């Protein structure tokens, strides 16, 4: 079972692959975003995630399709681009949230330990660190 962090990371990675943006957006939703539980997100991100979810499932499907396919079919390319940007911003925001939560763990250590505090921290409900979790590949701007 993937964590919320991993699902948002997977959605962002789906969006950066090759192919039409609408297909990538539908893939990101079906394979990742649909499995994110709103209550597992930090409070500050819940409203934006709900809006993203609603924007991807707002249309009634035709026979043989689901709401996501119907929605992206009716979306303009610029709407799809903007929604994809929202997904990436959500992933970046959750990285920042968990990095700030992990910062107290690294206090009193050298600078190289600050990155280690985030290693494996995936926002688990009990605050425990996930074993063998991937290191987030995020560069500070």
Image (tube, grey):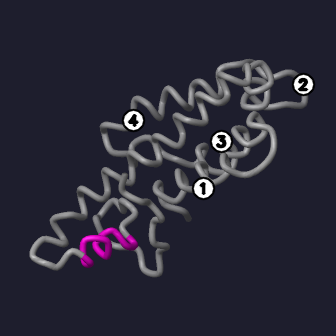
Q: Which residue is mark 3?
A: 29
Q: Earlier in the sequence, mark 3 or mark 1?
A: 1
Q: Earlier in the sequence, mark 4 or mark 3?
A: 3
Magenta extent: 112-120
Q: CA distance from mark 3 to mark 1?
A: 10 Å
The percent position of residue 64, horizontal first and vertical second, equals 90, 31
Dividing the image into 4 quarters, which one contains the N terminus? bottom right
Mark 3 Cα shell of 10 Å, populated few (<14), some (14-19), many (≥20): many
Cβ atoms at labels 2 and 3 below 8 Å apart: no
Q: Earlier in the sequence, mark 2 or mark 1?
A: 1
Q: Residue at x 72, y 52 (%)?
A: 17
Q: Residue furthest front?
A: 141
- Identify the mark at residue 128; answer none if there is no mark: none
Q: Is residue 42 above or below residue 5?
A: above
Residue 115: in magenta span: yes
Q: CA distance from mark 4 to mark 2?
A: 31 Å
Query: Disc 4 vs disc 2: which is toward the camera?
Result: 4
Q: Earlier in the sequence, mark 1 or mark 4?
A: 1
* In front of the other: 125 or 22: 22
- Identify the mark at residue 46; answer none if there is no mark: 4
- Identify the mark at residue 10; answer none if there is no mark: 1
Is residue 82 left or right of 136 when viewed as pictured? Answer: right
Label 1 sits on a secondary structure element that is helix
Q: Which residue is mark 2?
A: 63
Residue 127: in magenta span: no
Q: Residue furthest left?
A: 108
Q: In terms of secondary structure, what is the magenta stretch mainly?
A: helix
Cβ atoms at labels 2 and 1 below 8 Å apart: no
Query: Disc 2 vs disc 1: which is toward the camera?
Result: 1
Q: Residue at x 47, y 35 (%)?
A: 49
Q: Earlier in the sequence, mark 2 or mark 3?
A: 3
How many labels, in total?
Answer: 4
């Amino acid at each position: 079972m993937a964590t919320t962090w991993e699902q948002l990371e997977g959605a962002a990675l789906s969006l950066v692959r090759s192919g039409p943006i609408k297909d990538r957006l539908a893939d990101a939703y079906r394979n990742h975003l649909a499995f994110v539980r709103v209550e597992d997100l930090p409070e500050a991100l819940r409203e934006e995630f709900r809006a993203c979810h609603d924007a991807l499932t707002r249309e009634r499907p035709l026979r043989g399709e689901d709401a996501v396919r119907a929605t992206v079919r009716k979306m303009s390319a610029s709407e799809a681009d903007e929604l994809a940007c929202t997904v990436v911003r959500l992933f970046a925001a959750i990285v920042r949230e968990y990095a700030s939560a992990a910062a107290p763990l690294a206090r009193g250590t050298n600078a190289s330990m600050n990155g280690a505090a985030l290693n494996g921290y995936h926002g688990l409900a009990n605050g425990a660190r996930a074993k063998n979790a991937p290191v987030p590949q995020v560069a500070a701007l």
